[in-house]
Image (cartoon, rainbow, N blue to C red):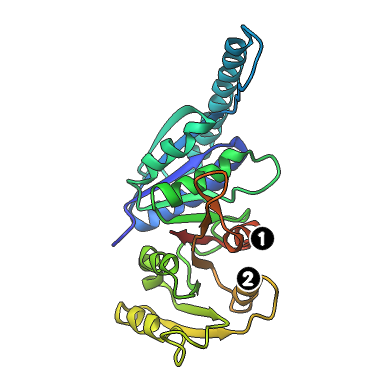
Amino acid sequence: MTYKTILTVLTNPSEAELAIRSAARLARQLDAHLEILALAVDRTQLGYSYLGTGAMLLEAGLEQADLEARRIDDAARVALKEESPDLRYSLETMVAQIGLTPELVGNRARFADLVVLPCPYGTGLGPEAEAVVEAALFDAHAPVLVLPASGLGENTLPKRIVLAWNQSAEAMVAVRRALPLLKQAETVSITVIDPPITGSDRSDPGGALCQMLVRHGVKAEVAVLARTQTRVSDVLARHAREINADMLVMGAYGHSRLREAILGGTTRNMLEKAEIPVLMAH
């Protein structure tokens, strides 16, 4: 498997330069096509309203969304002017209501090999940013590369990768989706935190996965760590800093709540404090 279609979804003009610069670097390095969706979201929630005010609210919301769409489109075009002319890309601008965003993004991401998105948590970001990440992960089942504020860093393709492993189905999906990147890395640290004493690989935590990856040509090794901090995400982040990792690969975990899918605790904690790109899959 290789990544030949890379998708990025822009919901905020301020994130356009980061997302396009990073996604374009990957597209050129991997000889892939970059698809850019500039998506403005109409957040109008009518609920109960006085007679006649509903249409006024809809019109005002649509006008605001159209204006935001033009801003996102303009920011995307400015960012694209800074890219090499040999970049193969397409740009489409759309407006959608907040409730239809997951379906729209899910349909687009389903046909992408990799989705590259800015971190959905931060100042000035609305709920649509998280909705886009969730739709790509849980609706489209696409691998999602979430960028920190610093972007990809100095290496377009990561040289040192931390692979979070807990034997779960989600972690295994992430391994398979990340294989093109794992195979070209100089080192992959299969990181196991507090392995269970009664598991199928209790005598050799991560050993079966390491063997599988080595057969694919991956330069893998296993690191078994104690849970010395309250959050697993903090242990992973510290290990990534210690080995100067360029990327973290992990399964994405969702919990059913009021919405169909909400990013689980470890996943959200990791993204909120991410210092390096995080590739997730579900």
25, above or below 210, in the image: above
Q: Which residue is mark 2?
A: 237
Q: Secondary structure at mark 1?
A: loop
Where, quadrant-wise, is the N terminus in this rendering? bottom left
Residue 79 coordinates in the image, percent (x, y): 53, 39
At x 57%, y 16%, the residue is 58
Q: Position of residue 209 (x, y in %)?
A: 38, 80
Residue 26, quarter of picture? bottom left
One can see residue 257 in this view:
yes
* In this rendering, position of residue 188 left or right of residue 129: left
**In the shown orientation, is residue 176 left or right of residue 274?**
left
Q: Position of residue 139 (x, y in %)?
A: 41, 47
Q: Which mark is residue 273?
A: 1
131 is higher (above) or lower (below) than 2: above
- Residue placed at 48% from the left, 35% from the top? 101
Query: Splitting the image into 4 quarters, where does residue 277 fall?
Result: bottom right
Is residue 21 in view from this perspective?
A: no
Residue at 60% across / 21% down in the picture?
46
What label does residue 150 carry, if any? none
Name the residue type under label 2.
Ala
- Badge 1 local density, few (<14 within 10 Å), some, or many (20+)? some
CB under 8 Å between callouts 2 and 1?
yes
Disc 1 residue type?
Lys
Say few, some or many: other residues with alpha carbon within 10 Å of mark 2 (under 14 / 14 to 19 / 20 or more): some
Near-viewer residue (161 or 251): 251
Camera-side residue of 167 and 120 = 167
